[in-house]
Amino acid sequence: MKLGQGFDQIKPGAIIISTLITIGVLIFLAALGMTLTTYAEISEESSHTYAFFTILILTIIFFGAGFFASKIAHQTNVFSSVIHSLCTWAIISILLIASIFFAIAGQKVKSAVSAIHAPIIITDLKIFEGKAITTIKETPHHHHELDAKSEKYHKMFELIWPICSISLSIGLLVSIIAGILGYKKPLNN
């Protein structure tokens, strides 16, 4: 095989279809996870359990996406098959990291906006006396409620980067394995 010979066999449709199906599965699992953990208390032990299952699920998803991309591409050499699975891994990884950045940015904006306390302007009209009295009061602060919520999010975001890097590393390996297992062996007549 000559250098670069497998690149002319790349089928973008297989990569896109595999990526879209994987994104659909990830959205379904994220919605299911949010539903199941909405009222759950995040403790030290449960956060490690969530981390383990997140890594496990992402590993299975990366393997499935790579295998599916390789299978629907109908590649007869291993190199092209692995390239399909790696392209799918790369696109999903970029989208996963982008979604984490947006989640963290959204949380930072929410924290910044919730720290702003707009004053309340109260105007008391005394019609019979012919005067109006305007007073400005501060809104009540709810620091204890905000601190508990931000601490919960801080615990979650603290685990995101290690989980993401472990998942992407394992995902890279299982994508290569999926590409090797997913190629179509040529028939020898």
Image (cartoon, grey):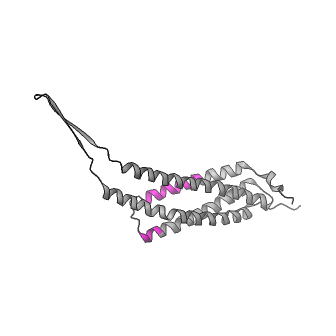
- Whether residue 92 sits left or right of residue 77 in the image: it is left
Report the front residue among 14 and 187.
Answer: 14
- Whether residue 19 sits left or right of residue 130 in the image: it is right
Say which residue appears at 74% left-offset and 53% top-offset.
Answer: 73
Where residue 176 appears, as percent x and y from the top left, is 70, 64
Let me know if residue 184 appears in the view. no
Magenta part of the protein: which range? 23-47
Where residue 35 appears, as percent x and y from the top left, is 44, 56
Report the front residue among 62 and 43.
Answer: 43
Say which residue appears at 61% left-offset and 57% top-offset.
Answer: 93
Report the front residue among 127 and 51.
Answer: 127
Query: Magenta region's main secondary structure?
Result: helix
Say which residue appears at 15% left-offset and 30% top-offset.
Answer: 131
Task: Say above or below: 148 vs 126.
Answer: below
Image quadrant assignment for residue 127: top left
Where residue 136 appears, as percent x and y from the top left, is 24, 41
On-image quarter of the N terminus: bottom right
Image quadrant assignment for residue 187: bottom right
Where residue 159 appears, as percent x and y from the top left, is 50, 65
